[in-house]
């Protein structure tokens, strides 16, 4: 039986711990209907994944007893996704699916044709946490506030291997990522595509990543790029 996994902040995962987080307790006791003897996995996103057993249900808290330590699972590549902000709930979809595919850093981009500029960072962080819990990752991706394309290129250029997605008849990476530098990033354009000026800027700072001979939606391109680079 698959164990449910829960991310916990600022909580030392010792051999015996008391948990009083109201949201967790509501999910465990009211939704999942855990009882004494039920097992669950806690992870802190940085050091430990541990299997616990529900030992005691108190008034406003539960006691967990350590069963065993678990092997941590983290993505092999340190992958940055620079994605132009999308409309409606497409950003949520990108965050969820690309967390499942191993993206470790989400950097929303403001470009000339970006139609949406608002971004709820708190909501985004909640989405990547839930996706990490469900897919079995031991780390939590980092999400930052949106920055302009020029700012991103200036900040990351020369520090990590950079690519930008393009339509092509052949799905391939023109330049293989460095084996020395484990960090790499890919830029995905907005629904309306990059402007000619932005393409020139990207071409001067990034290698081309050919995704498909077909025109992909921006959110599809994010998933395709993340899968290809992993």
Image (tube, rainbow, N blue to C red):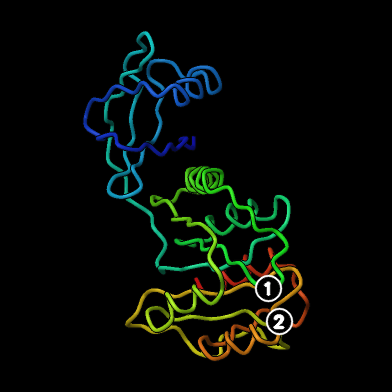
**Residue lying at 34% horizontally and 79% vertically, measured from the top left:** 181
Count of labels in the image: 2
Q: Give the image quarter of residue 227.
A: bottom right
The tag earlier along the polypeptide, 1 or 2, is 1
Disc 1/disc 2 C-alpha distance (Å): 7 Å
Say above or below: 132 vs 170.
Answer: above
Residue 12 image point, x, y percent = 24, 35
Q: Which mark is residue 112?
A: 1
Q: Give the image quarter of residue 148.
A: bottom right
**Residue sticking out furthest to the top:** 59
Q: Give the secondary structure at mark 2.
A: loop
Q: Is residue 143 left or right of residue 197?
A: left
Q: Which mark is residue 120?
A: none
Q: Is residue 146 left or right of residue 7?
A: right
**Residue lying at 53% horizontally and 47% vertically, measured from the top left:** 131
Of residues 139 and 123, the one drawn nearer to the viewer in this rendering = 123
Residue on which the image places disc 2: 195
Of residues 72 and 201, the one drawn nearer to the viewer in this rendering = 201
């Amino acid at each position: 039986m698959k164990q449910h996994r829960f991310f916990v902040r600022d909580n030392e995962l010792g051999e015996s711990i008391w948990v009083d987080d109201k949201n967790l307790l509501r999910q465990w006791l009211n939704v999942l209907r855990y009882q004494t003897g039920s097992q669950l996995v806690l992870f802190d996103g940085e050091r430990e994944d541990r299997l616990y057993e529900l030992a005691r249900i108190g008034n406003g808290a539960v006691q967990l007893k350590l069963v065993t330590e678990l092997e941590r699972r983290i993505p092999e590549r340190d992958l940055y996704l620079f994605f132009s902000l999308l409309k409606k709930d497409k950003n949520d979809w990108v965050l969820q699916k690309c967390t499942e595919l191993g993206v470790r850093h989400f950097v929303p981009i403001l470009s000339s044709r970006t139609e949406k500029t608002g971004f709820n960072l708190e909501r985004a962080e909640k989405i990547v946490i839930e996706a990490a819990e469900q897919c079995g990752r031991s780390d939590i991706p980092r999400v930052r506030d949106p920055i302009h394309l020029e700012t991103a290129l200036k900040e990351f250029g020369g520090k990590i291997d950079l690519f930008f997605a393009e339509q092509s008849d052949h799905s391939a990476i023109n330049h293989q990522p460095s084996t020395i530098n484990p960090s790499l990033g890919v830029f995905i354009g907005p629904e309306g595509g990059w402007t000619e000026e932005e393409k020139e800027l990207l071409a001067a700072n990034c290698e081309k990543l050919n995704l498909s001979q077909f025109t992909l939606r921006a959110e599809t391109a994010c998933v395709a790029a993340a899968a290809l680079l992993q």
